[in-house]
């Protein structure tokens, strides 16, 4: 195993992510787990596991990002925009637009030829444009994650979900179910509604650019299909999409 050079941590609202890299930027070990309210304790245990899995010692520096980054003892602490752009560019090896959909926010970042941030937009004021929106509504519909893609794919029609507020959307979905609308159609309509909001957030930023996808929602095939429809073009899901921010945080301190 190559010698570990750096560790990157991304403390998100939903998941804690970490990677250990060698000097060339290759991932030696990684870890993804639900975020605990006791972030300092969780980080200490998770870093110990990362070090044990990669052979890193206590002298290996740590880069941190995410909403909980200030609660991580790190050599550098950087914004999510910077880290996600850097991580995405390392994985894609080319410029484009990154859509990162997490539990707390959705970020759209235009990445330049050298991996720099050219522009960005962020939905961080309301859960309606985030993974939390899907989590709440799908839980109400009692659709497990592994069934989301198949249910949306077999829907005979899309049932629109027009509410832009998570609370109101939940009430709207309850009403749709009571009216006899098929769950599959509601699931498809839910994803299309969210994809439309993301496309609106991105605006002209995506003009002429390849679109990459990261974040936990990138693991949802129904969301990828809805985004393809909303943007009218393919969506490239980055490898290990949940680790993009942690990778970028690590690369800042190599």
Image (tube, helix red, strand yellow):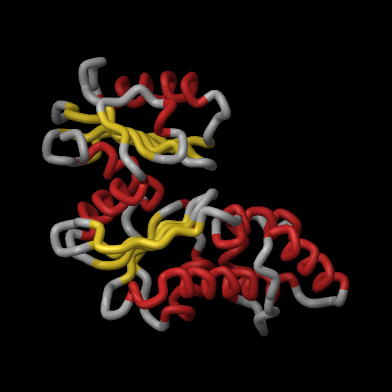
- Residue 253 occupies quadrant: top left
Where's residue 141, x and y in %? 74, 60
Instruction: Farthest residue to the right: give it.
Output: 178
Q: Residue at x 14, y 26 (%)?
A: 3
Q: Nearer the viewer, residue 191 or 107?
A: 107
Instruction: Farthest residue to the top: give it.
Output: 58
Residue 204 against residue 218 in the figure, above or below: below
Q: Residue at x 33, y 34 (%)?
A: 64
Q: Nearer the viewer, residue 135 or 111?
A: 111
Residue 177 against residue 136 in the figure, above or below: below
Q: Is residue 206 left or right of residue 126?
A: left
Q: Is residue 222 left or right of residue 73?
A: right
Where's residue 103, x and y in %? 54, 49
Where's residue 83, x and y in %? 30, 46
Q: Residue at x 34, y 45 (%)?
A: 245
Q: Is residue 147 left or right of residue 49?
A: right
* Quadrant of the snapshot with the N terminus: top left
- Residue 250 occupies quadrant: top left
Q: Residue at x 23, y 21 (%)?
A: 56
Residue 49 against residue 142 in the figure, above or below: above
Q: Nearer the viewer, residue 92 or 1?
A: 92
* Quadrant of the snapshot with the C terminus: top left
- Residue 211 occupies quadrant: bottom left
């Amino acid at each position: 195993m190559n010698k570990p050079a750096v560790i990157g941590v991304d403390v998100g609202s939903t998941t804690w992510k970490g990677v250990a890299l060698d000097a060339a930027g290759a991932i030696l070990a990684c870890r993804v787990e639900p975020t605990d309210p006791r972030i300092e304790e969780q980080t200490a245990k998770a870093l110990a596991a990362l070090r044990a899995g990669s052979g890193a010692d206590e002298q290996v520096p740590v880069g941190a990002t995410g909403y909980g980054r200030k609660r991580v003892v790190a050599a550098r602490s950087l914004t999510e925009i910077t880290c996600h752009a850097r991580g995405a560019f390392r994985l894609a090896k080319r410029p484009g637009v990154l859509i990162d959909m997490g539990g707390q926010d959705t970020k759209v970042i235009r990445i330049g030829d050298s991996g720099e941030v050219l522009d960005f937009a962020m939905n961080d004021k309301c859960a309606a444009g985030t993974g939390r929106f899907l989590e709440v509504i799908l839980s109400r519909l009692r659709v497990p994650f592994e069934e989301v893609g198949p249910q949306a794919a077999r829907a005979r029609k899309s049932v629109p979900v027009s509410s832009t507020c998570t609370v109101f959307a939940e009430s709207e979905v309850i009403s749709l179910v009571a009216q006899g609308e098929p769950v599959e159609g509601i699931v498809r309509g839910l994803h299309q509604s969210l994809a439309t909001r993301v496309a609106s957030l991105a605006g002209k930023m995506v003009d002429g650019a390849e679109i990459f996808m990261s974040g936990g929602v990138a693991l949802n095939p129904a969301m990828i299909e809805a985004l393809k429809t909303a943007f009218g073009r393919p969506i490239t899901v980055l490898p290990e999409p949940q680790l993009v921010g942690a990778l970028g945080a690590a690369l800042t301190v190599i």
